[in-house]
Amino acid sequence: MTSLLSLPWVNAKETPKPKPQDWQINGISAALDDGHDQVKGYALYKLVEYNLKDLKSLVKKPEDIAEKAAKIFKDEKVDANVRSSAAVALGNLGDAAAKYVPDILNILKDEKVDAYVRRNAAEALGNFGQAAAQYIPDIANILKDEKVELYIRRNAAVALGRLGQAAAQYIPEILKFLKDEKVDSSVRGSAAEALSNFGPAATQYIPEIANILKDEKVDSIVRRSAAEALDKIRKLELKEVVVILNNFYERGDSAYLNWRFLTYFLGGGTEEVKILLKWLGSPQAPPDKLTHDEGVKILKVFLEAWNGSQGLESLRSDLAKQISEVAANKNVPWKLEDIFLLQSHHNNLEKVKSTHANAVQSAIDKLEVWRWFVRSRDTILFHAAFWLALIFAYPKFPQVQAIFFWNLWVRRILGVGYVGFLLTWVPFFRRKLFEPFKPSLLADAGLDNFHHQSYFPESKVKVPASGDILPITAALPSIKGQIILEGDSGLGKSMFLRHLLQNSQRIVVYLPAQKCHKGVIEAIQDKLHGQAQDADFLKNLIYSGAIDICIDGLNEVTADTRAKICQFVESYFRGNIIMTTQPLEWTPPSTAKTYYLQPLEQQQIQEFLISRQPRLPKDAKVQGVDYEKACTNYLTEVLKQQAKEELDAVRRILSNPMDLTVVALMLAQGKQPNLFRLQEQQYNLMAAEYLREWNQEFTLKKFSAAVYEMRLEDKQALPAEEFYQVLQSLEDEKYKMVVSRQWQDEKGEAKKEWYFRHDKIMDFFLVQNFLGETDAAEGLLVDRMGDPRFRGVYFLLATLLPLDAAKELREKLIQYAADTKDNTVSNTFVQLLRTR
């Protein structure tokens, strides 16, 4: 308590002066007229004990008292102490004594006057306010004159301070006086008090006052006075208030706790100040358990405090220690966003070579590892998101397809290795890769013309290994593994493939075997519109099962093409591949299983015929119950007792779905099918209608020659421009010898192409080029004997050639088989010829 009362800012708050009564003033006034100077002195001393600002209510003329005091003050014969008391009294009388300001100033300036009198004269001037304003320069000159006695200058500074804003321009002079180390501490303290009286006008000089507070060489009394001066100027910011707190660390200062109070007081008791004092300046017990948010807030306060503590070595030493304590606090789970805050502290501690920097670095190191992980994670996530966005943009933008996914180097470099792996082995991504090409991949399958009602699901296959005969849809519900489906022409191999394609949820490519003459990979690349430049990537996709493959008609290609297909199948033994072929002499891939498509059984024949009804022409002559009766009657007639060989031939034809479909069409038209000349009979019906419709003969010879050239060139589409009328008749629902497919080209223009519905129909027109006694026809019989594309033609020749010519051709085929070890054509030819 003693130390508290000793503070200047406490002593300055004097007890308010009492208001005098009239008899008291009258007594003092009378004493001022006494002949003894000492009595006058007592009277003046007593006078200043009262509040003299409102004497008019007590005395008619307070100016009389002022006049008496002025007379005493100016009388050089009067004792100096009495004159000093008169100066103080004049200062307290205010406006009543204002006219004596020039006299007071003259005595202040008079070097011959006693110093004690001049001191009080200087102080008195400060009490006159506006009345003394014009004399401020004179008072300032006293302050600046180093020849003038020190305490006179001190009181001149105090007077300027009391005059306030009017004297603000002289603050630098007062400050200079305050900073003068040669001046006594108590005098400098009064200068600080004078500064405080300027209030906000002294704001710009706070840094200079702070420098005095920083200087430990400056007497503690002066520093406390300087701190007191700040009280009346403004609240200090955190980076400024640390200057106050730094004085706490001065050893030997008995009032050291006062500096903690002043830190609270001058800092305005803000949250930041409270946080600072919880850790610095010997707090009772620094917090131990901290949350993350508390730790961050503390370090932010510490950072601001550090930035304002330049030159405050004692405070910085304590602050560095507390920074390390908070940074190393195990209860604070530092986060990545805190790393810059920690690094700022670490850099500050490193600059001053503090050993506490190690603790902060340790906290940073832990975060650096996590930051590296998070940055890596964020980079990977961004990279993955980028490629994921490309995947979704992929189907619509060919540039994305070509540049990013099917370009080897772009995919490897920008994909950082893992993209190619994911594209290969993640089913969703694999599907996306082929999604834009799906129409092209299935184009050759002609699914536009496939109707599920057209397919007869009761067809059966012989399962390898077990030899069981099962429905094909049960034995082969999907393309899984490597499968060869072998069966005679017309049994429904291609129809089954279309059935699989129509119902498959996976990406499937349909390849006619003829298009694999360069290789299977190359054939698939052609269907990807040139985007799949990276053949190795495509191979990996196929190997991983990204795309199922259908290869139709192995019997229609050369042995060389079949060898390429077999090599591909064996190389990609994990791929899902199904191949179809008619019986032939070859070595199938060792990794594939062969399923044998069975002819229709006798009870299935009628079921098949009746199942064709939904696909018959709408204007068919025979429909509904009549059609079913026609089917039953026809089957009864053709299967009645007859020669065994002829009956076997009939059953063989009726067990063929393709031939049976033609039978159904004819029965619907009210015709009696000739099983041994079905295609020819169907053609004759179509040609007769063509003549009626177009008034001209069907150009069989010309059309057949064009089909032959088309076959040689391995083309599928028929020459529409030259044979448009012909194709219209062939496409008629009553005959369905050809089917059409429509699409839009790259320019958006409508396109339409026609194809033979089945190879048997194409073979009928091809065979026309082999019939006749011309040298060209004779030459073809020999030249195309080993060409698999004309295999079906030779089977037709067995029934269409004159018997002797057919026998002659039989011998040639046998000889060819003996030479080539390929008797697949000759065997079937002999069997067909035998029926004649």
Image (tube, rainbow, N blue to C red):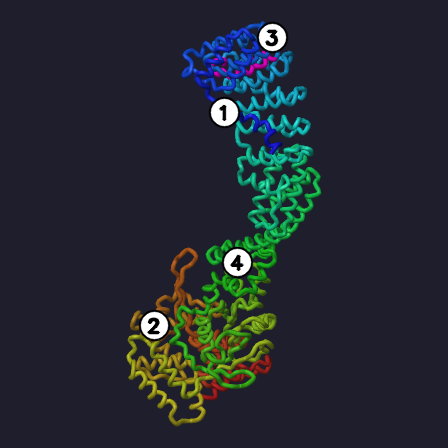
824 or 549, nearer to the observer:
549
Q: Residues within 10 Å of mark 3 (few under 14, many from 20)?
A: some
Of the two numbered discs 1 and 2 in the rendering, the one whose residue sits closer to the viewer: 1
- Count the labels in the image: 4
Give the mark nearest the N terminus, 1 or 2: 1
Which residue is disc 3 drawn over?
113
Circles 1 and 2, Cβ within 8 Å, touching? The answer is: no
Q: Is label 2 in a helix, a strand or a loop?
A: loop
- Secondary element under disc 1, as helix, strand or loop, is loop
Badge nearest the viewer, 2 or 3: 3
Task: Measure how far apart labels 2 and 3 are at the Cα level.
Answer: 142 Å
According to the picture, the residue beneath numbered tag 2 turns out to be 732
- The range drawn in magenta is 116-133
Q: Are marks 3 and 4 in contact (CB under 8 Å)?
A: no
Which quadrant is home to the C terminus? bottom left
**Residue at image location 37% in from the left, 71% down from the top:** 699
Magenta span contains residue 673: no
Q: Is residue 674 above or below residue 149?
A: below
**Residue 10, position as x, y percentages in the image:** 56, 29
Q: 776 and 7: which one is in front? A: 7
Going from N to C along the chain, the mark reached first, 3 or 4, is: 3
Type of amino acid under label 4: Gln
- Crowd around label 1: few <14 · some 14–19 · many ≥20 (10 Å): few
Mark 4 vs mark 2, foreground winner is: 4
From what the image shows, is residue 308 above or below residue 741? above
